[in-house]
Image (cartoon, rainbow, N blue to C red):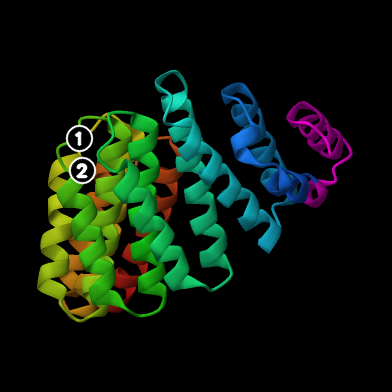
Amino acid sequence: MLDADGALSQIDEALRRSRYRDAISAAAAVPRGALGHQQLSHLMDAMIAAAAGLADNSDDELHAYDLVVAMGDALSKERIYRAAAQQRVNSALFNKGVVLAQLGRVEEAIAVYDELVNRAGGSRQLGLRENAVRALFNKGARLARLDRLKEAIAVWDELVSRYADDPEPSMSEAVAKAMVSKGIALAELNREAEAIAVLDEVISRWGEERDPALRARAAKALLNKGSTLIQMGQRQLALKTYADLIKRFGKHKEPALREQVAVARVRKEALELELS
């Protein structure tokens, strides 16, 4: 029987040969109680590498993420390793949720996203919070794709409630993204007045931001406000909304903004022809 160092060397060799499944199988057979802290950390990195090497949405990839979580939980008991271990566990859970969602195993994905948020949603580490907010957004998006729009809206409301006051720009963008998605979902439910109220809040809060990502969210809110107004039969107001978007953001060069402006111009021209 190989000792711990011998097992790790075997796993490293399998990775070098791109035999990722062999590496995962060998790692699963190593008694974690026989590993020191540095060996556990090494094995976590090996499983992250194996999962990334596979990237095939397989059971083996999912198993690698589970191994990362199990080893990370063991390693997190030691303060010196805790922060790095938690970050790797957090990323493994997020990736596992993405894979499960892509496989159509939505309820399992949601359970993983919930676990991630419970573990890291209130962390002081920005990276952990960013993954938690991404997990919440993805949970809402998956529910929306299943036409479970009311549930999706509730998830996005939770995201906004948790992180609306977070000062980090990346978190503000996540909040804005969730609010725009909520506005779109409300419009799909024919709750147009509520949709416009949410979209107007995004425009008001972030329409003058210097951060390009936040401006892009405000532009998308304007674009979807125009669509919602058309849905309500208020074409003149929709025309003004598209004109407002073009006026606000037409001179910006960021790709995301230029895309929104281009769509607004097309829709504005079509409306002008219709109303002429």
Residue 263 occupies quadrant: bottom left
Q: Residue at x 39, y 56 (%)?
A: 113
Q: Which residue is mark 1?
A: 166
Which percent across, then down, holds residue 230? 23, 75
User: What span is colored magenta in the figure?
Assistant: 1-22
Do the residues bearing badges 2 and 1 touch, measured as CB atoms within 8 Å? yes
Residue farthest along the front direction in this orientation = 1
Q: Residue at x 82, y 49 (%)?
A: 22
Q: Residue at x 13, y 45 (%)?
A: 204
Of 41 and 208, which appears nearest the observer? 41
Residue 196 occupies quadrant: bottom left
Secondary structure of residue under mark 2: helix
Secondary structure of residue under mark 1: loop
Q: Quadrant of the C terminus?
A: bottom left
* Residue 91, numbered circle: none
Is 11 inside the magenta-drawn segment? yes
Q: Which residue is mark 2?
A: 163
* 68 w.r.t. 151: above or below: above
Which amino acid type corresponds to the residue marked 1 in the rendered image? Answer: Asp
* 231 w.r.t. 211: above or below: below
Q: Residues within 10 Å of mark 1 (few under 14, many from 20)?
A: few
Q: Residue at x 26, y 57 (%)?
A: 180
Which percent across, then down, holds residue 5? 76, 26
Of 81 and 211, which appears nearest the observer? 81
* 125 w.r.t. 190: above or below: above
Q: Could you tell me if residue 217 is visible in this image?
A: no
Q: Name the main secondary structure of what is drawn in magenta.
A: helix
Which percent across, then down, holds residue 132? 35, 46
Which amino acid type corresponds to the residue marked 2 in the rendered image? Answer: Tyr
